[in-house]
Amino acid sequence: MITFGDSKNFPLHHLITLFEQTDWAKGRTLEDVEQMLTHTSLVITAWDKDQLVGFGRVLTDFVYRASIWDVIVDRPFHNRDIGKGIVNRILAHPSLEHVELFWLCTRNYQSFYASLGFSEKEQTGMVWDRRKHLTPIL
Ligand SMILES: CC(C)(COP(=O)(O)OP(=O)(O)OC[C@H]1O[C@@H](n2cnc3c(N)ncnc32)[C@H](O)[C@@H]1OP(=O)(O)O)[C@@H](O)C(=O)NCCC(=O)NCCS
């Protein structure tokens, strides 16, 4: 049985293993991930006994805006409603009940998020990638 939680208090090597399955989070270090979690507003985790099989996180002001990042389900556990379970638990979380607008960025999973009520029509995102730029000089 899959269980869900919102505690940040779990061994981080579980998360590194999940991150290794993605192109964007591969190579993240324990030290950086620890700092990332400290400053993350909310995490939702999914567990098969003591194995982390799903993860998603939120950065937010708790009133107006929240962004959802790093939604990942362990490959052997895909298509078992775990990803939907994570996103729905984020949207329904009591600490986020006043948030007006949730935002996320996805390259390949538009239909997955559309089935959860997300729309592509509202706005488009733009990114500034530090790895592709010199630091701006003021
Ligand atoms: C996206 C992801 C989190 C979905 O998790 P999941 O637990 O397999 O998803 P669920 O079982 O809850 O939902 C499956 C739904 O997603 C759809 N889906 C599965 N793969 C898909 C794909 N490549 N593109 C679009 N939709 C897809 C299924 O058709 C299914 O929809 P249905 O219920 O209408 O049939 C998972 O595929 C994943 O971890 N992918 C790799 C990491 C990633 O790219 N994350 C997205 C970051 S934006």
Image: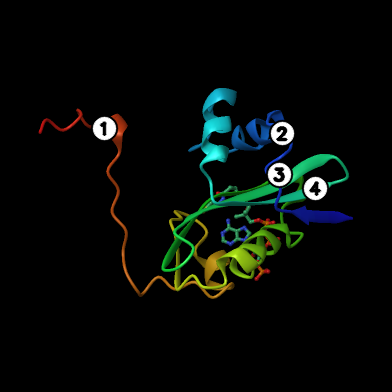
Can you name the residue that lies furthest to the left here? 138
Q: Secondary structure at mark 4?
A: strand
Q: Secondary structure at mark 2?
A: helix
Residue 45 or 124: which is nearer the viewer? 45
Image location (x, y in percent) of residue 52: 76, 42
Q: Which residue position is annotated with label 1?
A: 132
In the rendered structure, which amino acid carries the disc numbered 1?
Lys
CA separation, marks 3 and 1? 30 Å
Q: Secondary structure at mark 1?
A: helix
Front position among marks 2 and 3: 2
In the rendered structure, which amino acid carries the disc numbered 2?
His
Is ligand 1 closer than 8 angstroms to the Cβ of mark 4?
no
Which residue corresponds to the image point at 65% horizontal and 37% vertical from the top-left?
18
Q: Earlier in the sequence, mark 2 or mark 1?
A: 2
Which residue corresponds to the image point at 35% horizontal and 74% vertical from the top-left?
122
In the rendered structure, which amino acid carries the disc numbered 4?
Trp
Front position among marks 2 and 1: 2
Q: Which residue position is annotated with label 2?
A: 14
Judge left or right: residue 103 versus residue 36.
left
Q: Which residue position is annotated with label 3?
A: 74
Judge left or right: residue 48 versus residue 95.
right
CA separation, marks 1 and 4? 36 Å
Image location (x, y in percent) of residue 71: 58, 51
Label 4 packing within 10 angstroms: few (<14), some (14-19), many (20+) = some
